[in-house]
Amino acid sequence: MSMPNLPRRHNGSGNDLANTPVLESSALPITSPLVPTPKKRKHWARQYRTEIAASSSNSVKTRMQAYRFHHFIDCIQHTYKTEGFKGFWRGSLAPLASITLVRTVSFSIYQKAKYSYSAAIGQATGEEPLITVNRPGSIPTFGTIACFGTAGATAGGIVAAIACPFELTKLQDKLRTERHF
């Protein structure tokens, strides 16, 4: 779908809306959440560069664990001959999707658990860990360590159940080739 030839806004501010098309009848820019701006593309690349860069070596490692190869180079050569360059990134889409979901859910669960555990510890001891930790010059106490550690363990345990299907999908995708023995 091509964009109609519309006048462009040039306000010299340097923000993302500076060169977006505008309708003649209004000063509102035509933007879509589905079309990434250059700023969003840079942000996405920074967030996922580790996954993108590590995916090819992870693919070779997974294949070497699942199939019998003579050595590392043998696995690389076989993958390239049978699947081409894209074979090294097979199964990378599921982890990219899961990273966003898992991080969002993990921090949300951690935050909720932290406040719940702090309130429960406060009722039991009379001293809430979140109040203690926010005092200037405070040092960690058993209550703060227990509160934050338990909240992290709760978030990690729940997120593991969410991330597991994505990891299984990734492994199945990476190993979905003919067997090499």
Image (spheres, rainbow, N blue to C red):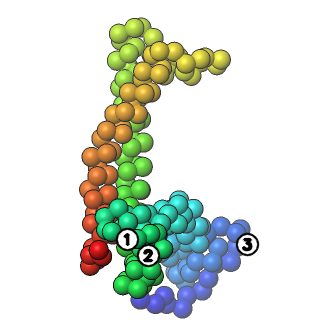
Q: Could you tell me which residue is drawn at 36 percent across and 84 percent down?
A: 82
Residue 151: mark: none
Q: Amino acid at mark 2?
A: Asp
Q: Position of residue 151 (x, y in %)?
A: 39, 30
Q: Are marks 2 and 3 in contact (CB under 8 Å)?
A: no
Q: Are marks 1 and 2 in contact (CB under 8 Å)?
A: yes
Task: Tell me the CA gap for discs 1 and 2.
Answer: 6 Å
Q: Nearer the viewer, residue 14 or 5?
A: 14
Q: Are marks 1 and 3 in contact (CB under 8 Å)?
A: no
Q: Is residue 100 above or below residue 118?
A: below
Q: Nearer the viewer, mark 1 or mark 3?
A: 1
- According to the image, label 2 marks what residue? 74
Q: Secondary structure at mark 2?
A: helix
Q: Could you tell me which residue is drawn at 43 percent across and 27 percent down?
A: 149
- According to the image, label 1 marks what residue? 69
Residue 12: mark: 3
Task: Tell me the CA gap for discs 2 and 3.
Answer: 55 Å
Q: Could you tell me which residue is drawn at 32 percent across and 57 percent down?
A: 167
Q: Residues within 10 Å of mark 2 (few under 14, many from 20)?
A: some
Residue, far right: 12
Position of the C terminus by quadrant: bottom left
Q: Nearer the viewer, residue 169 or 79?
A: 79
